[in-house]
Image (cartoon, coloured by chain):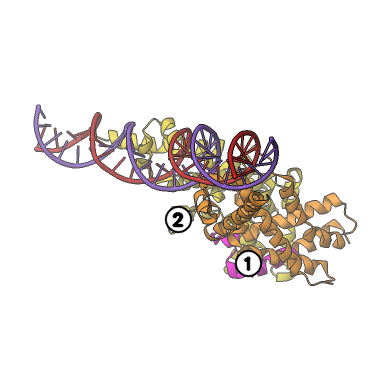
Chain colours: A yellow, B orange, C red, D purple
DNA sequence: CAGTAAACTTGAACATCGTTCAATAAACAA
DNA sequence: TTGTTTATTGAACGATGTTCAAGTTTACTG
């Protein structure tokens, strides 16, 4: 009775795992429907019974990656850490470390561009916003006078800047910070931004 | 006698222009050999007489983009600008503006990843390094005590951080700084980083 | 000019993709 | 069993980057 349903569900989760491994091993561009089908044991066309298209599959894997990232960031700050600046530095470094350890999966989060006009599903949007609390909360503690809008913008600035350093740094391009110096430079950047906010903005 | 050579040269530069326009209009993924061939008036296979492969063509267009970016950054600081911090802010904002006005071409610079094992040609490397003087020189003026290595790393940090804000900001993603606030946030970041260096590093 | 060799150009063909869909098989109901 | 619905298949389609044997043009020589 549930046989077919069960099989589908099994196949679906197999598909996600296979896709995740394939991206981790060979990058986003190494993800091929035929390889996936062979790996989970079905016809290549059958992939489209489990998932609307590749976009959905990639978003699905992305969701898993974001959740693991969320856990990594949470684990990075010791419970009871009292100093918000220290927390922000820890979170930034944890972001860097996660990206380094999950390079291809992390890259896939940003390389993938949705086909125009197709909208990003709600659950994917939710995944992305969840991460922000790791930055927003310490900032709110540091600058209690600021409005949520200001804090939101500052959090995005901080994230974007750190993200840029990590993204270019891990590409090992010429324009990037060399890898051995990367973590120290990130810590320096975060501290400088916080100091700059405290000095000019007049928070706290 | 030179007829064939002339034609080839003409076709080659036509190809670069067509490729540039095509990327600007439809993005890097909208660049198709058959469309190019039709546009410059030759057989699709003939593209490979003018260029080794798509990678080379993309690097070629990238080179042009980098040169225009170089000019834009040069134009952004008034001659005789005496304050290095102000210069750095101007350069960062000019980078942001250039990216916004040349969105697809600028994205192509970073989206394109060379096929593994194939090496980036010298002239492309040179193009990339040229840009660094816009950041390096003001920094060297600001912190004359620092070693070239330290300055190089700092310049890369600064560039990467600003690049990150621009890259995410122009994608209009949720994690990005909203567009209206972007320029102001970039200026704030640059000032904060410089202040941070001055305070902790003991330069000047 | 005629003839030949070299250089260039062509477009059909190849291998790979994501994606679709008519045909087949399986599962279930009566 | 028989009929109906549902799930699965794999061949086929339309792009795409790239190659290459064949054809064409150009440049040189006698």
Image side of residue B5 versus residue A40, left or right: right
In the depicted view, which residue is nearer to us: A6 or B105?
A: B105
Q: Quadrant of residue B155?
A: bottom right
In the depicted view, which residue is nearer to us: B153 or B20?
A: B20
Q: Position of residue A16 (x, y in %)?
A: 45, 39
Whether discs 2 and 1 lie on one chain: the answer is no
In the figure, A149 relative to C25: above or below?
Answer: below
Distance of label 2 from label 1 (alpha carbons): 23 Å
Could you tell me which chain the residue with mark 2 belongs to? A
In the depicted view, which residue is nearer to us: B129 or A122?
A: B129
Q: Quadrant of residue A189?
A: bottom right
Q: Position of residue A153 (x, y in %)?
A: 61, 65
Residue displayed at 84% across by 49% down: B149
Crowding near the residue tagged with mark 1, few <14, some 14–19, many ≥20 C-alpha atoms within 10 Å = many
Label 2's element?
loop
Give the quadrant of the C terminus of chain B. Answer: bottom right
State yes or no: discs 2 and 1 in contact (Cβ < 8 Å).
no
In the depicted view, which residue is nearer to us: A180 or B166?
A: B166
Q: Position of residue A96 (x, y in %)?
A: 66, 47
Residue range corresponding to the magenta coloring: B168-190
Label 1's element?
helix
Could you tell me which chain the residue with mark 1 belongs to? B
Q: Which residue is mark 1?
A: B182
In the figure, B164 relative to A53: above or below?
Answer: below
Query: Is residue B145 at all visible to an observer of this figure?
Result: yes
Q: Which residue is mark 2?
A: A120
Query: Is residue B31 at all visible to an observer of this figure?
Result: no
Q: Position of residue B143 (x, y in %)?
A: 86, 59
Image side of residue B142 versus residue C1, left or right: right
Residue displayed at 69% across by 40% down: B119
Label annotation for residue B66: none
Crowding near the residue tagged with mark 2, few <14, some 14–19, many ≥20 C-alpha atoms within 10 Å = few
């Amino acid at each position: 009775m549930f046989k077919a349903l069960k099989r589908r569900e099994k196949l679906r989760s197999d598909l996600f795992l296979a896709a995740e491994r394939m991206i981790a091993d060979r990058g986003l561009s190494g993800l091929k429907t035929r390889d996936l089908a062979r790996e989970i044991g079905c016809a290549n066309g059958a992939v489209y019974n489990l998932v609307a298209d590749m976009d959905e599959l990639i978003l699905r894997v992305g969701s898993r990656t974001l959740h693991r990232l969320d856990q990594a960031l949470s684990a990075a700050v010791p419970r009871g850490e009292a100093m918000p600046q220290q927390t922000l530095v820890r979170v930034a470094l944890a972001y860097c470390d996660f990206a380094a350890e999950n390079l291809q999966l992390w890259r896939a989060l940003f390389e993938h561009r949705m086909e125009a006009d197709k909208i990003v599903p709600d659950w994917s949007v939710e995944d992305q916003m969840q991460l922000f609390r790791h930055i927003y909360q310490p900032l709110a503690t540091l600058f209690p006078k600021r409005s949520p809008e200001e804090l939101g913008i500052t959090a995005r600035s901080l994230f974007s800047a750190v993200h840029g350093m990590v993204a270019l740094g891990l590409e090992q391009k010429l324009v990037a910070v060399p890898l051995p110096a990367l973590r120290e430079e990130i810590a320096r950047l975060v501290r400088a931004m916080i100091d700059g906010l405290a000095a000019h903005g007049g928070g706290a």
